[in-house]
Amino acid sequence: MTNESTSTTVSVPARMEIGRLAPEIYRAMVALNRTISESGLEDSLQALVKIRASQINGCAFCIDMHTLDARAAGETEQRIYALPAWAETPFFTARERAALALTEAITLISATRVPDDVYAEAAQEFDEQELARLIWAITAINAWNRIAISTRMVAGKYHPAG
Protein backbone atom coordinates (compact mmCIF):
# COMPACT_ATOMS: atom_id res chain seq x y z
CA MET A 1 0.00 0.00 0.00
CA THR A 2 1.43 3.35 -0.98
CA ASN A 3 0.53 6.71 0.37
CA GLU A 4 0.98 9.22 -2.39
CA SER A 5 0.72 12.84 -1.50
CA THR A 6 -0.42 15.17 -4.22
CA SER A 7 0.04 18.86 -3.95
CA THR A 8 -2.06 21.11 -6.08
CA THR A 9 -1.71 24.85 -6.12
CA VAL A 10 -5.05 26.58 -6.36
CA SER A 11 -5.12 29.89 -8.11
CA VAL A 12 -7.48 32.38 -6.52
CA PRO A 13 -7.63 35.41 -8.78
CA ALA A 14 -7.67 38.90 -7.36
CA ARG A 15 -10.96 40.74 -7.74
CA MET A 16 -9.36 44.09 -8.42
CA GLU A 17 -6.17 46.08 -8.04
CA ILE A 18 -7.46 48.58 -5.52
CA GLY A 19 -4.19 50.51 -5.36
CA ARG A 20 -4.37 51.19 -9.08
CA LEU A 21 -8.08 52.06 -9.03
CA ALA A 22 -7.93 54.41 -6.03
CA PRO A 23 -4.26 55.39 -5.84
CA GLU A 24 -4.71 58.49 -3.70
CA ILE A 25 -6.44 56.52 -0.94
CA TYR A 26 -3.96 53.67 -1.23
CA ARG A 27 -1.06 56.13 -0.87
CA ALA A 28 -2.74 57.56 2.25
CA MET A 29 -2.99 54.07 3.77
CA VAL A 30 0.65 53.39 2.94
CA ALA A 31 1.60 56.72 4.56
CA LEU A 32 -0.43 55.79 7.66
CA ASN A 33 1.42 52.47 7.79
CA ARG A 34 4.79 54.21 7.49
CA THR A 35 3.89 56.67 10.27
CA ILE A 36 2.83 53.81 12.55
CA SER A 37 5.95 51.79 11.79
CA GLU A 38 8.09 54.82 12.69
CA SER A 39 6.05 55.66 15.81
CA GLY A 40 8.48 54.17 18.30
CA LEU A 41 6.64 50.93 19.02
CA GLU A 42 9.00 47.98 18.82
CA ASP A 43 9.16 46.44 15.35
CA SER A 44 8.77 42.95 16.82
CA LEU A 45 5.63 44.01 18.70
CA GLN A 46 4.15 45.55 15.57
CA ALA A 47 4.85 42.34 13.66
CA LEU A 48 3.12 40.20 16.29
CA VAL A 49 0.07 42.48 16.24
CA LYS A 50 -0.12 42.37 12.44
CA ILE A 51 0.19 38.61 12.30
CA ARG A 52 -2.32 37.96 15.09
CA ALA A 53 -5.01 40.29 13.71
CA SER A 54 -4.50 38.79 10.25
CA GLN A 55 -4.87 35.27 11.67
CA ILE A 56 -8.13 36.17 13.38
CA ASN A 57 -9.46 37.83 10.23
CA GLY A 58 -8.27 34.97 8.01
CA CYS A 59 -6.28 37.26 5.74
CA ALA A 60 -3.92 34.98 3.81
CA PHE A 61 -2.18 37.87 2.03
CA CYS A 62 -1.36 39.68 5.28
CA ILE A 63 -0.39 36.50 7.16
CA ASP A 64 2.03 35.67 4.35
CA MET A 65 3.46 39.20 4.21
CA HIS A 66 3.87 39.79 7.92
CA THR A 67 5.25 36.36 8.81
CA LEU A 68 7.85 36.78 6.06
CA ASP A 69 8.73 40.26 7.35
CA ALA A 70 8.88 39.00 10.94
CA ARG A 71 11.22 36.15 10.01
CA ALA A 72 13.41 38.52 8.00
CA ALA A 73 13.62 40.77 11.08
CA GLY A 74 14.71 37.83 13.26
CA GLU A 75 11.43 36.68 14.83
CA THR A 76 11.53 33.01 15.81
CA GLU A 77 9.46 30.30 14.16
CA GLN A 78 8.39 29.14 17.62
CA ARG A 79 6.78 32.47 18.49
CA ILE A 80 5.16 32.88 15.08
CA TYR A 81 3.67 29.37 15.25
CA ALA A 82 2.49 29.92 18.83
CA LEU A 83 0.59 33.15 18.13
CA PRO A 84 -2.85 31.52 17.89
CA ALA A 85 -2.25 30.10 21.39
CA TRP A 86 -0.12 32.94 22.81
CA ALA A 87 -2.03 33.00 26.13
CA GLU A 88 -1.05 29.39 26.83
CA THR A 89 2.67 29.80 26.13
CA PRO A 90 5.62 31.30 28.03
CA PHE A 91 7.11 32.78 24.82
CA PHE A 92 5.78 36.33 25.09
CA THR A 93 6.60 39.18 27.47
CA ALA A 94 3.95 40.86 29.62
CA ARG A 95 4.01 43.83 27.23
CA GLU A 96 3.52 41.59 24.19
CA ARG A 97 0.75 39.66 25.95
CA ALA A 98 -1.10 42.89 26.74
CA ALA A 99 -0.73 44.00 23.11
CA LEU A 100 -1.96 40.65 21.81
CA ALA A 101 -4.97 40.69 24.14
CA LEU A 102 -5.83 44.20 22.99
CA THR A 103 -5.32 43.16 19.37
CA GLU A 104 -7.79 40.32 19.79
CA ALA A 105 -10.33 42.52 21.55
CA ILE A 106 -10.17 45.29 18.94
CA THR A 107 -10.17 42.83 16.04
CA LEU A 108 -13.25 41.12 17.49
CA ILE A 109 -14.79 44.42 18.61
CA SER A 110 -18.38 43.51 17.68
CA ALA A 111 -18.19 40.58 20.10
CA THR A 112 -15.89 41.94 22.82
CA ARG A 113 -16.50 45.71 22.90
CA VAL A 114 -12.88 45.87 24.23
CA PRO A 115 -13.36 44.83 27.86
CA ASP A 116 -12.15 47.17 30.60
CA ASP A 117 -9.74 44.57 32.00
CA VAL A 118 -8.05 44.10 28.61
CA TYR A 119 -7.71 47.86 28.17
CA ALA A 120 -6.43 48.26 31.76
CA GLU A 121 -3.81 45.55 31.23
CA ALA A 122 -2.58 47.35 28.09
CA ALA A 123 -2.57 50.68 29.95
CA GLN A 124 -0.28 49.13 32.59
CA GLU A 125 2.25 48.01 29.98
CA PHE A 126 2.13 51.05 27.66
CA ASP A 127 2.20 54.74 28.47
CA GLU A 128 -0.67 56.81 27.03
CA GLN A 129 1.19 57.79 23.88
CA GLU A 130 2.35 54.22 23.23
CA LEU A 131 -1.15 52.92 23.83
CA ALA A 132 -2.57 55.41 21.33
CA ARG A 133 0.01 54.26 18.78
CA LEU A 134 -0.78 50.61 19.50
CA ILE A 135 -4.48 51.23 18.92
CA TRP A 136 -3.62 52.90 15.59
CA ALA A 137 -1.44 49.92 14.64
CA ILE A 138 -4.22 47.44 15.44
CA THR A 139 -6.79 49.55 13.59
CA ALA A 140 -4.57 49.88 10.51
CA ILE A 141 -3.89 46.15 10.16
CA ASN A 142 -7.60 45.43 10.53
CA ALA A 143 -8.28 47.91 7.71
CA TRP A 144 -5.60 46.28 5.54
CA ASN A 145 -7.09 42.85 6.26
CA ARG A 146 -10.48 44.02 5.10
CA ILE A 147 -9.01 45.52 1.94
CA ALA A 148 -6.96 42.41 1.13
CA ILE A 149 -9.81 39.98 1.81
CA SER A 150 -12.50 41.91 -0.03
CA THR A 151 -10.31 42.43 -3.11
CA ARG A 152 -8.72 38.97 -2.85
CA MET A 153 -5.15 40.16 -2.84
CA VAL A 154 -3.08 37.14 -3.85
CA ALA A 155 -0.84 35.56 -1.20
CA GLY A 156 2.52 34.07 -2.04
CA LYS A 157 4.01 36.78 -4.22
CA TYR A 158 5.37 39.06 -1.50
CA HIS A 159 9.11 39.24 -0.77
CA PRO A 160 10.51 41.16 2.22
CA ALA A 161 12.61 44.23 1.47
CA GLY A 162 16.35 43.92 1.84
Image (cartoon, helix red, strand yellow):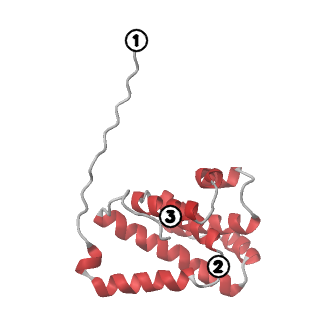
The dot on residue 66 is 3
Q: Earlier in the sequence, mark 3 or mark 2?
A: 2
Whole-angstrom CA distance, mark 3 to mark 1, is 41 Å
Q: Nearer the viewer, residue 140 or 41?
A: 41
Q: Earlier in the sequence, mark 3 or mark 1?
A: 1
Mark 2: secondary structure:
loop
Answer yes or no: is residue 105 visible: no
Whole-angstrom CA distance, mark 3 to mark 2, is 16 Å
Q: Point out residue 93 in the picture as x, y percentages from the top left corner.
A: 75, 63
Are the residues at dot 3 and dot 1 in contact (C-beta closer than 8 Å)? no
Asked if residue 73 lies left or right of residue 6, the reply is: right
Mark 3: few/some/many CA within 10 Å (<14, 14-19, 20+) = many
- Which residue is at a point 36% across and 66% down the rendered structure image? 148
Mark 1: secondary structure:
loop
User: Quadrant location of residue 8?
Assistant: top left
Asked if residue 8 lies left or right of residue 90, the reply is: left
Figure check: 79 above or below 148: above
Are the residues at dot 3 and dot 2 in contact (C-beta closer than 8 Å)? no
Q: Which of the image's four quarters has the N terminus?
A: top left
Residue at which label 2 appears: 41
Residue at which label 1 appears: 1
Q: Nearer the viewer, residue 95 or 38?
A: 38
- Which residue is at a point 73% across and 69% down the rendered structure image? 95
Q: Residue furthest front?
A: 162
Mark 1 residue type: Met
Q: Earlier in the sequence, mark 2 or mark 1?
A: 1
